[in-house]
Image (cartoon, rainbow, N blue to C red):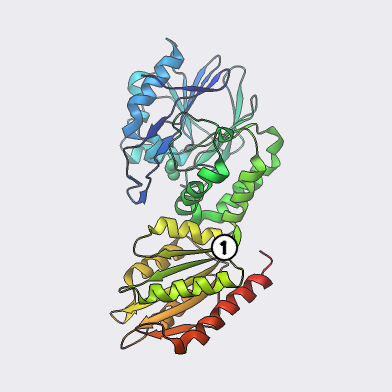
Amino acid sequence: MYCVRNITEDLYWVGANDHRTHLFENIHPISLGVSYNAYLLLDKSTVLFDTVDWGACRQLLENIEYVLNGRDLDYLVINHMEPDHGASIEEILLRYPKVKIISTEKSFMFMRQFGFSVDKQELIEVKEGDVQSFGKHKVTFVAAPMVHWPEAMVTLDLTNGALFSADAFGSFIALDGKLFADEVNFDRDWIDEARRYYTNIVGKYGPHVQFLLGKAAAVLDKIKFICPLHGPVWRSDFAYLLDKYQHWSTYEPEEKGVLIVYASMYGNTEGAAQKLASRLCETGMTNVRVCDVSTTHVSELISLTFKYSHLVLASVTYNLGIYPVMLDFLEHMKALHVQNRTIAIMENGSWAVKSGDLIQQFVDNSLKNMLVLNERVTMASALHADKETELNAMAQAIVDSLTETAK
Ligand code: FEO
């Protein structure tokens, strides 16, 4: 059964929701689902903007058939060729063999790489600033390399102000009937998943996102709708969304607060982490989040690391190294270019306490622009009363640092 919604009189959301996929990109859990957004414009010509993941293809086809209502599909614009959006291209070509495909040179290369038979179609290769008219609607194409793949572009409809923004401004969570961001309580119910989506999918490419934001700022008055490939469509409150993207893409924290991530085998490092959290809260710094590295998915940890200004890494020593799951978290931070944070280190070990020095080395050698506080807590097996002074000193150093930092 078709399931579509109007964005404007002649522009439709024809995408699909997915509650079946458990792991996005086969790595990130999506317990609340995800949407794959595609958009169909009915003008003198008919234009489909992007397709959907293979698993959602049937829904897309039903939606397109319903909206076209007997018309042919004239154009297919591909802003992003990653298979969660491009996988259904061949099915579209089978049903609408005369469709002309508009995309970038690299995108056509990827289509061939994935084995799509696109060369029998009319291919229109576009680049930055090119304009295409579909009748009443005129669109322009803007290169968006590495947001999040190198071939990506975004398309601005100069007639109705719809920005087809590819992966930019997207979010996890299935739409489930809602379409617009103002139909949900975004700041309460969506922001954490939007951050988890951005930081894990696009987080590495902050400078490229900054470049795109600069281009968007120059035409902001022309943008009336932001239509991403995942999550809700924005038609108001752009400042809220842009402010989040500004923070995330410059690796600046959203909030002054402390994320304590602990790696604990038998509960002793966990106990120390909890004690530190209590000390911080006693001082009045209650914006504290404590996570077990072993049971909190690393995509969630990365998202929280982008959110908070301060990070405490509390790790047991394991095989004379950093606890493997903690090391995995550190490697993800490195891969996603997390930077500009203040870090404190707690270490534990029963016969050779190594984790603190190794974490310090990792931060120094592999992460950028991190400040590691001098106050370290070192435990032999467990935190005892004689270490309370060290722990209090760390809590005070964190509070002092929070007070000093402007944000
Ligand atoms: Fe949702 Fe980079 O694809």
Question: Along the line of sight, which residue is nearer the eye, 157 or 250?
Answer: 250
Quadrant placement of the C terminus: bottom right
The amino acid beneath tag 1 is Asn
Q: Position of residue 264 (x, y in %)?
A: 35, 72
Which quadrant of the render holds ligand 1?
top left
Label 1 crowding class (10 Å Cα cut-off): few <14, some 14-19, many 20+? some
Query: As displayed, is residue 152 above or below residue 348?
Result: above
Residue 329 seen by the camera: yes
Question: Along the line of sight, which residue is nearer the eye, 367 or 45?
Answer: 367
What residue is drawn where x is 57% and y is 63%? 287
Task: Please state if 106 lies on the left or on the right of 112 as rendered.
Answer: right
Q: Position of residue 52 (x, y in %)?
A: 39, 32
Task: Please state if 163 lies on the left or on the right of 36 as rendered.
Answer: right
Q: Which residue is mark 1?
A: 287
Quadrant placement of the N terminus: top left
Q: Position of residue 353 (x, y in %)?
A: 36, 85
Query: As displayed, is residue 41 above or below residue 391?
Result: above
Query: As displayed, is residue 301 above or below residue 97?
Result: below
What residue is drawn where x is 55% and y is 45%? 188
